[in-house]
Amino acid sequence: MLADEVREEVIYVVSNTGGHLGASLEVLELTVALHHVFSTPDDKIVWDVGHQAHSHKILTARTSRMRTIRQTNRLSGFPKWDESVHDAFGAGLGMAAGRDLLGKNNHVIVVISDGAMTTGQAYEVLNNVSFLDSNLIIILNDNNQVSLPITTADGSPPPIGALRKALKRLRQAPKAITERVGGQAHEIVAKVDLYLRGMMINGIGACFFEELGLHYIGLVDGHNLEELVHIMKVVKAIPGQGTVLIHVVTEKGKGYAPAKAAPDKMHGVVKFKPNSGKQLKQKSSTLSYTQYFTESLIVEAERDDKIVAIHARREVVTFAAGLATKGLKPFCTIYSFFLRRVYYQIFHDVDLPKLPVRFAIDSAGLVAVDGLTHCNAFDTTLLACSPNMVVMAPSYERELMNMVATAATIDDKPSCFRYPRGNDIGSIIPSFNKGTPFRVGKGRVLEEGTRVAILGYGTIVQSCVAAARLLQRFSISATVVDARFCKPLDGELIR
């Protein structure tokens, strides 16, 4: 079958390039069905989760280039507007409304994950679709991974959140009907109109999506290609169908045993052996910046019970602001590329009222292999524009631990520090992983020279030191300064 061939290609490609695996496999049959029923680029398929689009790229004439993914000037690991006419920008409702205004009749299909359904923007769209009354097909890809927590030392904890519980009740509804009806229930349920299946959930009437004015269809086996194709053809043929939500249930890593067994570890992978799933990680004598940060924050929290660690997205920034008003010390850990989405909350809810929320910005800087969407060079500029924010960046891991300790002492304003992905140089770590706070706004001189001065900020300081050593070969004496702070700047030291 075509789906089997595409699955083999996805596994082979990612095993050689690294990247996102489990999520790509879970939507494979769904992707095949979409391209069988609909016709891109006239019909628009919008992938809310861009790293699920590997099979989409294979099915849109890019198979021969798939092995160049995550390489310079080659295929992106995500849909890319200027890479292919088949890649649609992630603005489904706007596309549908624009189509209507232009008097066209193509289809717009949005594939959104259950995890993305927890965000405010998703609910804003759901609130508006019935008002606009556009023909829009929403496919809710439910893999039971809503709000999956970060893996801990004890393994991966179960998914959490109220939305997960609500979707679980929807998934269990057909089972409940089966138990009441008896042995022939599967055949009976299959004949019941799919639309009605979404309206009678545990006897409480119309489901949440129906109340918002959407036509709900579910549950649909996301790995049953025949069923997917049938339902999509029916929906496609309905004239003026309005907005339809098809609730598809999938399994992360479907069709590849190692990915099914470890959905967390096989979500984003380095190169691996296809026959076993063993990842070919390079051994390092040092820990990652993320691990050094974690160890340091744990030590601070053991000494100060007011410290609260948070893995941040948009709504959590305002949540942290609320904690700070009660005298607690929230540390919000957030990827640099997610920080762009929460800038308004940081500025309005944290910075303007001068609330002492601490932001630990992970994976800062250029992350080349993940492309433009993960270009994380903007956080320093964005946060330095905030009038009250203290902005720091460590030159290496020991300095990171010191900045964790420094942030814990700043109680009159917000603060942040950024650190890159990957491992560091292996500097001497403070005893018991306990950093030493230093004076806010003060840099330090690493090397004294007489001819030129090199000022560095963050891990580029390591390159500044290397540059000074190179200049020594030409009898040029250089001063190397670690700014430590972008804001406030150490004006006295710079002068």
Image (cartoon, rainbow, N blue to C red):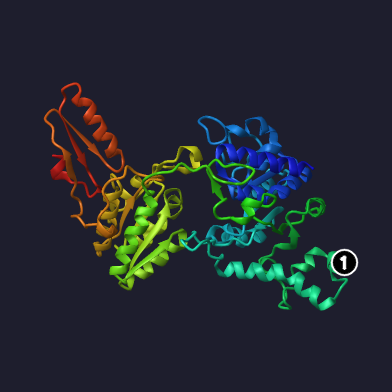
The residue lying at 14 percent from left, 43 percent from top is: 493
Side (left or right) of 322 relative to 209: left
311 vs 97, left or right, is: left
Q: Position of residue 469 (x, y in %)?
A: 22, 29
Q: Position of residue 436 (x, y in %)?
A: 22, 57
Give the left or right position of residue 386, taking residue 184 as reference. left
Residue 57, compared with residue 400, is above or below; it is above
Give the residue furthest to the left.
450
Measuring 43% from the left and 50% from the top, which residue is drawn there?
Answer: 340
- Identify the residue position indicated by label 1 in the image: 187
On the rendered image, what quadrant is the N terminus found in? top right
On the question of residue 363 being in view, the answer is yes
Secondary structure at numbered mark 1? helix
Residue 491: image x %, image y %?
A: 16, 44
Q: Residue at x 18, y 26 (%)?
A: 472
Q: Amino acid at mark 1?
A: Glu
Kindly indicate the quadrant of the structure image that contains residue 212. bottom right
Q: Residue at 77% across / 41% down in the picture? A: 2
How many numbered marks does the figure carry? 1
Q: Measured from the top left, where is residue 452 in percent x and y?
A: 16, 29
Furthest residue toward top:
474
Crowd rating for badge 1 (residues with CA inside 10 Å; few <14, some 14–19, many 20+): few
Relative depth, front residue between 492 and 215: 492
The C terminus appears in which quarter of the rendering? top left
From where the camera sits, is residue 392 visible? no
